[in-house]
Image (spheres, rainbow, N blue to C red):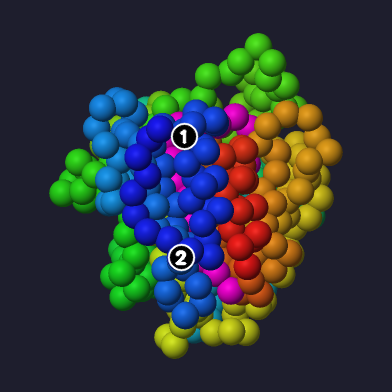
Amino acid sequence: MTAVQGHYDPAYKSVREVFEQNFVERGEVGASICIRDASGRTLVDLWGGSHADKETPWTRDTMSIVFSCTKAATALCAQILIDRGQLKLDAKVTEYWPEFGASGKGETTVRDMLGHRSGVPALRNPVKPGGFLDFDYVTEELAAETPFWEPGTDHGYHMVTFGWTVGELVRRVSGKSLGQFFKDEIATPYGVDFHIGLPKSEFERVSKMILYKPTPGDVPSDFVKAMMTDPTSLQALAFANNGGWYFDAPNAWQAEIGGAGGISNARGLAGMFGSLFGETPLLSKDRQTDMAKPVSEGDDLTLLIPTRFGQGFMLNIDNRHLDGEGNSAIMGEAAFGHVGMGGSIGFADPVAGFAFGYTMNRMGGGTLLNDRGQSLVDAAYSCI
């Protein structure tokens, strides 16, 4: 059995048990889980396994890429500016970023961008080699892009582009890059080990990822079918038109890819969402309540499954009626957060009174949670 290290409140013993079971029964390689209550007390802080090389131990401070959990970090940056009155939800994006109004996107609002309704979940023109590492280049391309649907009329997951659409708003309003703003306003003051743009000094702490290998029994999703059969489809463009971006290369770790490039661990995710609680919360109570209200619900034009989003955050998504793995992210009805490709997740549940983080290096199938992450979320709720 893989040695699991760390500590946990005895009331959360079942979370530790499930975490251990993931290594024994579900193929976990390296992972971490952290749960904090609303007072800031750490209830669970566990880690175990190894890096992708199967030799280097996963330690207390090991990190890995958390993919779309980064969207929650980017959204929190925007929410800070909204809370301060510097960014207005129902203002047109062109008020802050005039160039974005090109090609029929002039009526797009800030709320549309946060709710995956801005119509630019992908780029049609081939992204230049290394383009995803160049923030200015991608924002210029997105500003010129013709929307895939009329902004505000429907929603489709902005798989990676969310980091530049919302991230550029943060940059235009604050005058700082997305990664610097996150560091100055969230990571440093709240002691959060989460990075949008990782310094070289931290590289040795990063475990690379183990890609998911399909099995004969896998049920391909409609997203995968569209991506594999039509290279011009929205699905293929959103996933593969990326200029050769390889997420686990050091130059990608350093880039500020706010839609999918963040580096952290479970403690960092729980700490990020835990910043919303306590005596000096990151955001006002009114802002937290409003940002968790649904903006987009129903069939997703990108993922081709039903999804639910608030203002930049994924909400409870229960698609257990669908065949295949990774179609759901089942949390409390008051919870908001984000899943990362392969199965990581971070969220806050203000009603249940806790912040949750889980990261791993062996990716699962599907778009949302697999059984490892979901079993830990279920165990956390069972302990309340």
Q: Dot 2, crowdedness within 10 Å: few (<14), some or many (≥20)?
A: some
Q: Is residue 298 left or right of residue 61?
A: right
Q: Give the range drawn in magenta.
A: 353-368
Q: Identify whether 176 is placed above or below 131.
A: below
Mark toward the start of the polypeptide (2 vs 1): 2
Q: What element carries label 1?
A: helix
| Identity, as a three-letter code, of the amino acid under mark 1 | Phe
Q: Name the residue under label 1.
A: 23
| Identity, as a three-letter code, of the amino acid under mark 2 | Asp
Q: Does the magenta stretch include residue 363?
A: yes
Q: Which mark is residue 9?
A: 2
Quadrant of the image for the N terminus? top left
For the point 78% across and 55% down, the residue is 297
For the point 56% across and 40% down, the residue is 372
- Point out residue 34 in the picture as x, y percentages from the top left corner: 44, 58
Q: Name the image quarter holding residue 118.
A: bottom right
Q: Identify whether 317 is placed above or below 3.
A: below
Tag 2–tag 1 contact (CB < 8 Å): no
Q: What element carries label 2?
A: loop
- Point out residue 130 in the picture as x, y percentages from the top left corner: 35, 32
Q: Nearer the viewer, residue 77 or 369?
A: 369
